[in-house]
Amino acid sequence: MRLLLASQSPRRQELLAKLGYPIEIVKNKVDEHVSPDVPADRVAEHLARRKALAGYPVAHLADDEVLVTADTVVVLGGRVLGKPASHEEASAMLHSLSGRSHEVYTGVGLTTRHESCHSFTEKTTVHFRPLEDKEIEYYIDHYRPYDKAGAYGIQEWIGMVGVSRIEGCYYNVMGLPVARLFEELKLLMSKS
Amino acid sequence: MRLLLASQSPRRQELLAKLGYPIEIVKNKVDEHVSPDVPADRVAEHLARRKALAGYPVAHLADDEVLVTADTVVVLGGRVLGKPASHEEASAMLHSLSGRSHEVYTGVGLTTRHESCHSFTEKTTVHFRPLEDKEIEYYIDHYRPYDKAGAYGIQEWIGMVGVSRIEGCYYNVMGLPVARLFEELKLLMSKS
């Protein structure tokens, strides 16, 4: 089995490589705007499916190849937090996450030439202890989390010192639910 | 503040360094045998305190130095799992963890010249999906987890593909409850 990953996220590439299968990164640009009619807990899978269906030409897949697409979304009180466009927006997001729990959803799509996109969602609940203003400022200045939904990376400084507990899969918060993905790939192989 | 870490664990050294304080590694050899009278959920903190009190001479600490000691214990059904002495023992441990939940306790001791060891314990619940025999064999052969309590590292292959969820702090399972430690160090500083 060979995995084609349609994601430019270095974290996702690193996690997928850890599974032990050969991987290749493919380009796959889609519009990431989602209608507000899609419930917050379905947005990630919705985008993972769109990336699978609108992007890479499935007819180009070899028999032993699986196209992996994914999207990760941070949800606070039912509202999706995107990527912060400025220092002020990053600061506002981190202040809103401080001292409470939020949900991280990663949606994954698995596509073969025989089966059009099989998809699933994994949820992890993340709890931040109360963060101090100076901790938030330090993090934004030093880590510039402008490419990160919710303005933080759990594997970066603010995640290490600020996340007191999670419920669910840690790697899901980084961008791929590795254990679930491994299981789903085994199922897919056993069917083909 | 300067942190002296009495631990030879490279994982613990790496995690402590991430806090952002200057650190130094010190030698601290103690007998790790614990009386069966100590409850399983207290063993880690018991050893962290022993490492603090029996090891590094506290009188040598400067005013701004904190000696950090720690121990991590894996508990399955009330029984402490130690480090496996052989391939067979590692295999038996991983089979016993497969398809169920266990607890990981890390006990930490913080010692200054003014305050004799302040200690605390952090617990994380870890759930392994059912592991296949060949997955367990592959992991032991390739990762040789003989230095790891419970015969696994959550950051290694078997942790990534096998741990479906945790409840608590991820870094606690690696050997240091980073967020809690950061808070406790801030408290200690505010008192001195």
Image (tube, coloured by chain):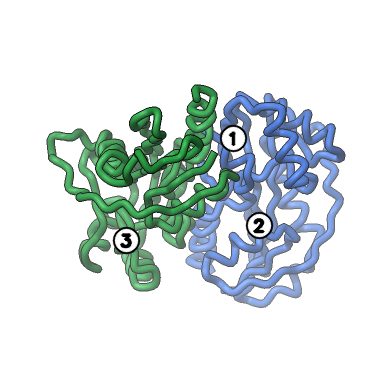
Chain colours: A green, B blue
Q: Which quarter of the image is occupied by the N terminus of chain A? A: top right
Q: Which mark is residue B11?
A: 2
Q: Which mark is residue A147?
A: 3
**Please, which chain is the residue tagged with disc 1 on?**
B
SS state under label 3: loop
- Residue A68 vs residue B42, the one in the foreground: A68
Say whether marks 3 and 2 touch (CB < 8 Å): no
Mark 3 residue type: Asp
Task: Point out residue A145 in the picture as x, y percentages from the top left corner.
Answer: 34, 63
Residue B74 placement, left or right of B169: right
Say whether marks 3 and 1 touch (CB < 8 Å): no
Residue positioned 86% across, 40% down in the render: B85
Residue behind mark 1: B162
- Residue B59 vs residue A57, the one in the foreground: A57
Task: Point out residue A22 in the picture as x, y percentages from the top left corner.
Answer: 56, 48
SS state under label 1: helix
Mark 1 residue type: Gly
